[in-house]
């Protein structure tokens, strides 16, 4: 991880106009579950996830799906352990633009579907959103800015990038893509199919017992 970070820093310096990203395993600590027969001891699985590295992983994935052809990703071999389906991630991108008419309630449900959480004022963090009247703030899981969407009735009147520290406007945007807040996002069709298969397995196990 340290060598990958060094290379990441060097390539950002050598290619300042490219999207240089860092994609490594986000575990600071990982202890798999284990059983020691000689002492009859069971060791529970334990882990610690680094939130900053998780943000960088999401940033790398978002960059690869952005359509740009100048993306450089520094990655470690263990980075793919437990990763979600890239196709599902790509299918769950929300694309919005100024002047677009959209039902606000449906839009909020769409954010929940891509694993953003509704937040209260005192707990607004990365990967969450909050609504104040006609203003919707989305703290992107993969970036260091907030997307502020101002509605006029059911029409998007303004899209802004906001500094989360100062709450000041960074820029006005004509359109923006919102990528999922988690690499493990999946489609409703896949979930529905999995639920049916679980119910079939449940019936079979009940018959067995």
Image: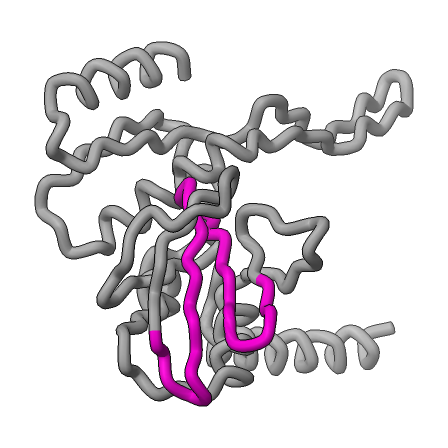
In the image, residue 126 above or below residue 106: above
On screen, residue 132 versus residue 9, left or right, reads right
The image quadrant that residue 17 belongs to is: top left
On screen, residue 79 versus residue 124, left or right, reads left
Along the line of sight, which residue is nearer the eye, 55 or 168?
168
The image quadrant that residue 119 belongs to is: bottom right
Residue depicted at 49% across the width and 59% down the height: 138
Question: Percent x, y for residue 74?
Answer: 26, 27
Quadrant for the N terminus in the image: top left
Quadrant for the C terminus in the image: bottom right
Question: Percent x, y for residue 175?
Answer: 25, 67
- Tell me where the magenta segment starts and ends, as one range: 130-157
In the image, residue 12 above or below residue 142: above
State the predominant SS element of the stretch in magenta.
Answer: strand
Question: Percent x, y for residue 193?
Answer: 53, 79
- The mark tally for this picture is 0
In the image, residue 98 above or below residue 178: below
Residue depicted at 60% across the width and 77% down the height: 197
Q: How is the image coloured?
A: one colour
Residue depicted at 59% across the width and 63% down the height: 130
Residue 37 covered by magenta stretch: no
Residue 138 covered by magenta stretch: yes
Question: Percent x, y for residue 30?
Answer: 63, 26
The image quadrant that residue 153 belongs to is: bottom left
On screen, residue 8 versus residue 34, left or right, reads left
């Amino acid at each position: 991880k340290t060598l990958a970070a060094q290379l990441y820093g060097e390539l950002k310096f050598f290619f300042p106009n490219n999207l240089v990203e860092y994609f490594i395993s986000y575990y600071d600590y990982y202890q798999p579950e284990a059983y020691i027969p000689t002492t009859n001891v069971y060791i529970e699985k334990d882990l610690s996830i680094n939130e900053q590295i998780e943000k960088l992983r999401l940033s790398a994935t978002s960059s690869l799906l952005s359509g740009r052809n100048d993306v450089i990703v520094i990655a470690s071999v263990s980075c793919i352990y437990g990763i979600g389906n890239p196709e599902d991630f790509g299918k769950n991108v929300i694309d919005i633009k100024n002047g677009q008419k959209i039902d606000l309630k449906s839009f909020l449900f769409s954010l929940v579907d891509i694993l953003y959480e509704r937040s209260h004022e005192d707990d607004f963090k990365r990967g969450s959103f909050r609504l104040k009247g006609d203003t919707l703030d989305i703290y992107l899981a993969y970036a260091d800015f907030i997307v502020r969407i101002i509605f006029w009735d059911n029409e998007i009147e303004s899209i802004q990038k906001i500094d989360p520290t100062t709450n000041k406007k960074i820029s006005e945007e004509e359109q923006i893509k919102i990528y999922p807040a988690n690499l493990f996002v999946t489609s409703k069709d896949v979930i529905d199919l999995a639920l049916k298969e679980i119910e079939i397995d449940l019936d079979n196990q009940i018959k067995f017992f």
